[in-house]
Amino acid sequence: MKAALFACSILCFGLVWSTNALAQDSRPVYPANSNKANYSDLNKLPDWRGLWFPVIGKVGGTEPVLIGEAKKTWDIYQERLAKDPHYEIPEPANNCEPDGMPSLITFPYNLEFVFSPGKITFIQEALMQVRRIFTDGRPQPKREELDPNYFGYSSGKWEGETLVVTTIGTKAGQRLGIAGITNSDQLTITERIYLDPKDRDLLHLDFTFEDPKVLGQPWKRTHTFRRDRTWEQIEYICAQNNRHLIDANGQTITPKPK
Amino acid sequence: MKKFIVLMTSIAVLAAVSITALGHHSFALFDLTKKVTVKGVVAKIEWTNPHVWVYADVPQTDGPPVRWGIEYTSINHLTRLGMKSTTLKVGDTIEFTVNPYADGTPGGRFQVMKLPTGKYFCDVGAAQQFCEENNK
């Protein structure tokens, strides 16, 4: 029996290894993962170290111009809220599921940015969400080539000290800006992220949302974050004790005392 | 006391405005227009995410104590406000102020507590103003 298991494990390992090797041979190696890395280039980038806490209440931008089904859905939610202040706009985050992009940015916790050659990693403390921005010049895939997911596919470039990021490929139905508005599969998110020229402990993140199925015109939202150099991120495991289950209609069930 | 009620009303308004911005789950199940203050004996502490829970047995004049479930914010916010897993201990008698559950379930969303030291500890956000004014 042991001999059979040993033989099987050797065979299985071989199959996995050869499959990986074949896949790697057929895929390009982009600069962020190449066998040469120039870490000295990172010194030319602005200093975004530390944790960045959102300045609550300091959100600017334009009003969303909703169209089609998005407008109808919004109106229905507002009507229900007017009739019942305890009505809850159904959202997946009620059940520890991440909101995805763009809401990853606006959780009332903090963001940490990790710079590496050709790649910037955003870590949101809430739900320990991770998002990668590719800055190595790799081609942006076409929308139809992507499997839509929570955070989408983000490519970025530096324009002076401003990081400009374009994200596509987020799955439809995620919160877009505020509860009650969700994106379609055609959403394009543009972010311009930069330190305040007068206060280097302030970071600005300006969104432009473009979604031809949801918005009649581009919608701009601006957010500000303040740097803290004293804290590190604290782990946040949402599944540890999530007592807010939701019913079939997306309404949170009142937890009973144990 | 009047000052406290006025402050709490303003907190409730702010909280209602920011419901959609706070993530994880809606606060629709709480009555944010109300504040209830009870004194109870801590029976259990769950120092967990996404939210910390404290259970307290609240004495009744006409029967056995009723267990209240008080939902705090996350470990992350509480830690940064100075609370630790050991700040409260089972057996402590604590005065809690909460937004009660809208359906009458005993308990609610934590706002303020008076610690055995006599100091107040307040929720993250607008409730902080109460601590700033009363912990001088």
Image: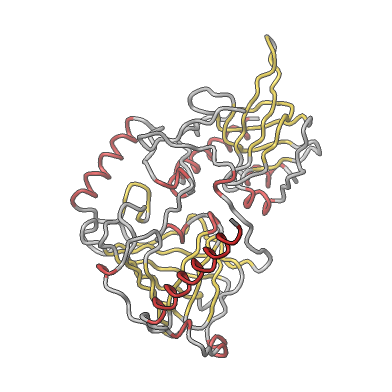
**Could you say which is closer to the camera, residue B121 or residue A167?**
A167
Q: Quadrant of residue B112?
A: top right
Position of residue A11 relative to residue A81, above or below, is below
Q: Residue at x 54, y 90 (%)?
A: A38
In the picture, residue A184 is in which quadrant? bottom left
Residue at the image position 50 percent from the left and 32 percent from the top = B30
Q: How many marks?
A: 0
Question: Residue B71, image x and y in percent?
Answer: 60, 37
The answer to which of A169 and B124 lies nearer the viewer is: A169
Q: A27 or A148, which lies in front? A: A27
- Quadrant of the image occupied by residue A176: bottom left
Specify the farthest residue to the right: B117
Which of the colour schemes (rainbow, by chain, secondary structure, one colour) is used? secondary structure
Residue depicted at 42% across the width and 53% down the height: A99
The spot of residue B35 in percent (x, y) is 57, 30
Quadrant location of the N terminus of chain B?
top right
Left or right side of A154 for B88: right
- x and y, in percent, of residue A230 in the image: 69, 66
Q: In the rendered view, would you say A257 is above or below A212? A: above
Q: Residue furthest left?
A: A68
The image position of residue B22, as x and y in percent, is 49, 48
Q: Is residue A61 above or below residue B32?
A: below
